[in-house]
Each structure stands twice: as C-alpha cells, then as structure tokens.
Image: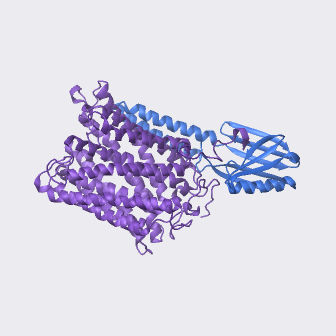
Chain colours: A purple, B blue
Amino acid sequence: MSDAAHAHPGHHTHPTGIMRWLTTTNHKDIGTMYLWFALIMLFSAGSMALLIRTELFQPGLQLVHPDFFNQLTTMHGLIMIFGAIMPAFTGFANWQVPLMLGAPDMAFPRLNNWSFWLLPAAGLMLMSSFLLPGGAAAGGWTMYPPLFIQGGISYDLTILAVHIMGLSSIMGSINIITTILNMRAPGLTLMKMPMFCWTWLITAYLLIATMPVLAGAVTMLLTDRNFGTHFFNAAGGGDPVMFQHIFWFFGHPEVYILILPAFGIVSQIIPTFSRKPLFGYASMVYATASIAILSFIVWAHHMFAVGMPVAAQLFFMFSTMLIAVPTGVKVFNWVATMWKGSLTFETPMLFAIAFVCLFTIGGFSGLVLAMAPVDIQLQDTYYVVAHFHYVLVSGALFSIFAGIYYWLPKWTGHMYDERLGKLHFWLSVIGMNIVFFPMHFLGLAGMPRRIPDYALQFTEFNQIATVGAFIFGFSQLIFLTVVLKTIRGGAKAPARVWEGAEGLEWTVPSPAPYHTFEVAPVLSK
Amino acid sequence: MEQVNTESLSRESSGAFVFQSRPNCSQTHAQERLAFRGLAALCLGTAIGFAGMGYWLVLPFEGLVIGLLIWARAVRHGHESDYESLTIEGDMVVLEWRMGNQSGHRQMNRQWVRVACDCTVPGRSCRLCVSSHGRETEVGHYLSDEARLQLAATLRSKLQA
C-alpha cells in the first residue's frame, strides 16, 4: 500500500513493441527470450557442425582451410555449450520455476533482465570474431594454453565473451536459488517441489561454485597474453598443465550443469505420460545432489594422458565410476515409473524415452573412458566425440525438445502438430544415431578428433556420419516449423494440457496469463 | 526490486474490518543464514584453495560472487517486513504500509473515503486506490486483479454500511 505517487512502477502497465522486450522484468517474457536466443545459437552452431561434417565427408582437404576448420570446431563447442544449451535451460527455469512454485515472478526481476541481455552481447562477440584478422579462436573450446596464449585478437574477444556469459549465469543462479528457497507457495516444502526445481536448485549451486573459477582461469590467460604474466606460460616458468586442472575443475561440473536440468525435465515428463507419480522421488533428489558433489572430485579423468601419479589416476578413475551409481538410480527410477504405467507416446514422451535409452549409451561410453588405461588409448579420438555427443545431444538437446513439446501448449495456448512433432522425433533419433554411433568405431580405430583430413580407412564411417548429420540438421527445420505453427494457431490447449500432468503450472489457464500467482496458492496436501 | 508473493487476510474483529496483506516468504531466518553461509563458504574455500597454489586471480571473481550474494541478502532483508493493512473501525479508515525502506500511515474519515478500481482492460491490469481530500493511496499491491476487484467491492460495502 502506498501513495499513488509512490506506486510500484510498471506494475499495472507494461510497454509494448521493442521496449517491452528490452525492459521487461516478466519471467515469461525473459524465458521466451532465452529460448529464442538459444534456438538462434543452436542453428548457428549447428550450421558450423554441418560445415565440419561436409569437410569430413571425404579424406583430403576440399572445402575449408584447416585453420578455419579449427575455428569451426572451437566456436561450435563454445556456442553450443554457452549459447544454446545453457540459455535454453535458463529459459525453461524462467518460465517454469515460478509457475511450479506458485510464485508471481523470479525473486529479482531486474537482475533477470540484465542476466538475459548480457547474453546477446556475448553471443555477438563470439560470432563476430570470425570477421577479425586471423579469424575466430581456434584453440578448442577448452581454451588450453599455449594455443590460447599465442592467438590473435579474437582470442581476447572470446575470453571477454566467456566472462560475460559467466556473469550472466551467476546472476541467473542467484536469482533461481533465491526464488526456489524463498518464494515457494505455503505448503510447498522442499521435498514436495517438482524435480525440475530441485535439479535447477542444485545446478545453480554448481554454477556459483564453478563459474568464478573459469573466470579466474581465463583472466590469467588474458594477463599471460597481454600483461606479461606467466601463470600458464612455460617459457616464463608457468605451468600450462595447471590450466587444464583449473579448467576441468570448472569443466566437469559444467557437464552436470548441462545435464541436471535435463534430468529435471525428463522427471516431469515421464510420470505425466505414465500416469503414475515419479518412482523414488526422495532417491532422485539425493542422487542429483550426489552427482553434483561427486562432479567436483573427478575432473582429472579428462587429463589421464597428461601424466599423473598412479594413485591419482586410481582415485580419479574410481571416483568417476562412482558417479554411475546415482546416475543408475535415476535411470532405474525412470524405468520403474514407466513400469506398469498407463503409457501413451506423445512427442514429449518419445523424446524422454529416447533420452533415457541414448543418454545411458553415453553414460556407458563414459564408464569406458573412465578407465585410465583405456582412456590413454582413446584420448582425443572420435570415441570421445561420440561419448559426449551422446550425452549432450541425446541427453541435453533431446530433453530440451521434450520440454518444449511438453510446455509449448501451456506457453502459447495452442496444441502443437503431433504428426510433425513425431516426424521431427523420428528423423532426429535416426539422424542422431547415424551421425554419432559410427564415431565410436572411428575412435576405436584411432581416428583423432579436431582434424580436417584423415586416413583412407576412415572414409566409409565418416561418410555415414555426414549423411546422418544432414538428416539430423535439416530435421530441426521441422522443429522450427512446429514451434512457429503452434505460436500462430492450432487447437486450443486446456489448462491441464496433459491428462496425467500434476503441478501448479497446470492450474493456470493456457496460455499462462502475463501475471500469475500474484496471490500465493495454498497447497492442501 | 524484489518481486513478492502474497499472503492476505480479511477479517472482522470486534466490529472492525481489517485487511492485511504481506509478501509470501517460504524461508526462515535460520534457513536463509544457512544457505548464504553455505554458498559463501563454498566460494571462499575455492578461492583460498586456488590462491594458495598461486592462482590468485580466482579471488576477485569469487569476491564478486560473494558481493552479489550479500546484495541479494540485503534486498531480501529490506523487504522481509513489507506489509499493507487497512482497518475500518467506527468512522475511521486507517491505512498502514511498509515497502522496503518506505513506510506510511494514513487516517481518513470514513464518510469521505472513495474507492476506485480502474482496469485498463475489463478485469485485467487493475489498480485499486482509496482517496480522500484529493489524495489517492494505492492498495492491494500484492493481490491479483481478481482479488483487487473483490477487495474493492468489499471495501465499498463496508464503507457504506
């Protein structure tokens, strides 16, 4: 209550046109912007992947200069991770966390606006670095010295872009933690929260713990490059291997930052289409927390080939294998949720089931790579590429597709085209497996990653992978068509879009009104 | 700055009508302290670990994060005692509010109080004000449009009674 002169600014009216999007503090608007930004970045980095695969269709150099090839692999990785997957999950968090908690918005709406608007600036920096003298950074997404110390101006720009994206993530995380801890509806205790909120809460903790470490590491790279320090410069007594340790102290939890929200999305979808509550909710929460904690003590499994004492190798090998336990608990619980359920197979469920099956393959190849003696053989081969794409494409990306199909009717008020959705699913699953499954064989046969040319014996599998890449890549245009079609019209979606859906987000009308839960709902059970 | 969720209460108490509304807060002080200290310790521990090995440039970034956490905590504390209340008792209408570091108290004669609820679209984007002697005061910040319209109707009937 206040005098009119001191009323809440913008509470009752909100600007329209471009100013709506620039100045918005509404969690739904910001969530939408995150998701569109992620889609644009997905298509940009996906186009780079298609260029890479085109070059690799035949042995020999045919399409791009080797240095440009390295720029493509570097930017593909950086943009997919920091520009596509992470912002997409943040978009989901913005849309869904307040709706799931019965909160009117995020805890710090203006901070939320800033968190988002930092991203396009950083994305533009990364993309525009191709236009700089010497082209974009080509040292790999891991930014290892000495390559990253020796490059041109685009390397500085890349470091700045990583800083900005990190700042955006930290601000977003503080917002999410405060929202989840402080703005739950009365009666919604932590152990009653939807799994998606739990996985994001833990992800936000991971981000806060690791992002400053990455920021420090790349700043030390920057000072090595420009101010004569020698943190990682061996010529001046620095230790380039230490960069790898610091990087992977961030980098391995980052893998879980990219996959825990995916676990959350799948944990919402599977119970809905199984028409059963999630099996072992508490064990899911504890498994998520265990994965997050273990992610801090496994980083050196990325560095077995660098050389380390046998005791350290054993420690990192066994600690990495230990992660399979809570991950196994999760897979078991998803399967147990489906067991004897009244299953239907709408597009979100299809993507969720594909996630469970294919992510498990990625997990198993991860176990193979966790074994130090095997890893030393497979390090920097296509086996590693196959492994992390099974985790991040059929894991993170498929869960994003699943989540979008699941909540799109709630966001737009229209049902999507199920026929096109299923076509998108089948082409994606088939395409994805054609691209990445042969890479296991290429890696086992010894084909190294990050090279534009290869020995003749690898030709057939590379050609198969390239054909799969084009199927997978172009099938994403179907996804874009589905999204645009759903926004423009379609069958009217009810408030509870899916028969088996549970949770506060399904109590508001579809599309979700601009302001929701201004009065906190009280949960009776 | 802080977006808040509402707990509101309307009741009749010994002939007086009382409306109270305050932001919803699901975290106790102890839980909030634990969350803040846990995060700060995590950041500080990481920073000290790397700084001890000579990689001290991690320190300012961890400091920045701790700074952001302190800011977030301060904003939360600034709004934890936000409330608004409206009491109609006898010939008096009493408004009290606190919003961040702003607070206020206003007494009006019941006979001169007017209730206005303007919506930009019917039933949506509504603004509820009580006015008297040419001065308007907004009420129901933490309410939904529906609840604001309902409160407006209740206030009108109570003021006419």
Viewer-closest of B129 and B121: B121
From the top left corner, tell me how far across and down residue A339 is, in percent: 40, 73
Q: Residue at x 38, y 33 (%)?
A: B58
Q: Quadrant of the C terminus of chain B?
A: bottom right
Q: Is residue A107 left or right of residue A212?
A: right
Residue B22 visible in image: yes
Q: Residue at x 37, y 58 (%)?
A: A477
Q: Quadrant of the N terminus of chain B?
A: top right
From the top left corner, tell me how far across and down residue B120 is, in percent: 68, 51
Extreme residue toward the top, this view: A228
Q: Is residue A199 left or right of residue A513?
A: left
Residue A330: which quarter of the image? bottom left
Residue A279 visible in image: no
Viewer-closest of A312 and A99: A99
Q: Residue at x 83, y 56 (%)?
A: B157
Q: Is residue A303 left or right of residue B74?
A: left
Viewer-closest of A56 and A219: A56
From the top left corner, tell me how far across and down residue B81 is, in percent: 66, 42
Q: Is residue A463 left or right of residue A267?
A: left
Rendered view: A434 above or below B52: below
